[in-house]
Amino acid sequence: MGDPMARRLCGAGLRVSVWNRSAEKARKLAAVGAVVHDSAASAVQSADVVITMLENGAVVEDVLFEQGAAAAMKGGALCIDMSSIEPARARAHAQQLRALGVDYLDAPVSGGTLGAEQGTLAIMAGGDTTTFARASTVFAALGRATHVGPTGSGQLAKLANQMIVGITIGAVAEALLLCEKGGADMARVKEAISGGFADSRILQVHGQRMVERDFAPRGRMTVQLKDLRNALGTAATLGFDSPITRQLEQLYAQAVEQGLTDLDQAGLFVALARRNGMA
């Protein structure tokens, strides 16, 4: 995700500095005008806006506070975390950054690598309205941004997004497999229900991957599992019961245990097919 997002920012005429934990990934961006740095701290030193796009909350915390990126940011800079992390951790990061004189937004995204390439990401931002307004130029290059509430709210919205995605992938996979098991043409069933109440972007995109048995990773199974677990953890702190999400978390966990780690999240289809003795 970080690569196409950085390319969009360069294409918008912004001066972009980059760093990645895998140095080779960052070096590729030099060809589109990005300045490549050998440390996170070096990359952020002169930046007005710093974007983190990392695997999980623990990695964000390490880069910001253990590798020195936060301490290297200049006073008045804006840090936008576009990773998907726990809401409570986002609020803690905001507090630590503000103590250093750095503003903060949690602004995770949805839309996958295709949305990042096309600049059509759905951006869910948490923070105060003044800070959100500061990010408008950056957000405009990446997609459609919506301010959803105070700090941590962006991460709550992303958890909602991932709950809906994970649950709906499960529903689509189970329904299409039922039809195939009964002798119907799965591709024609998908065509038949398109446009009705059961239609959705998940049916069209992930359902098509199921029809084609195309499970090359875009959003990995492990990332979907991480997000469902974050949702359940957040729900627990709020005293909220999430039985449907809990069931899907168990199914994704079982799929990962079966060795489907590197499949796309639509690969839950494979686990459900195996469960039913289908090839």
Image: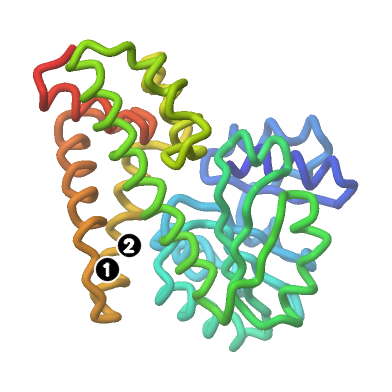
Instruction: Determine the residue positioned at 46% across, 80% down.
Output: 92
Q: Secondary structure at mark 2?
A: helix
Horizontal side of 204 relative to 210 (left or right) equals right
Q: Which residue is mark 2?
A: 230
**Dot 2 amino acid type:** Asn
Residue 247: give x, y in percent of width and height: 18, 51
Q: Amino acid at mark 1?
A: Gly
Q: Looking at this view, is 242 or 87 the one in front?
A: 242
Q: Label 1 vs label 2: CA separation?
A: 5 Å
Residue 135 drawn at (x, y percent): 76, 67
In this view of the protein, which residue sits in the foreground, 249 or 13?
Answer: 249
Quick one: SS at disc 1? Answer: helix
Q: Is residue 82 above or below residue 141?
A: below
Q: Crowding near pointer 1: few (<14 within 10 Å), some, many (20+)?
A: some
Q: Which mark is residue 184?
A: none
**Residue beneath disc 1:** 233
Label 1 close to label 2 by CB (< 8 Å): yes
The residue sitting at the right extreme is 13
Where's residue 231, x and y in %?
Answer: 33, 63
With 275 as the anchor, is 41 left or right in this view? right
On the image, which quarter does residue 217 sit in?
A: top left
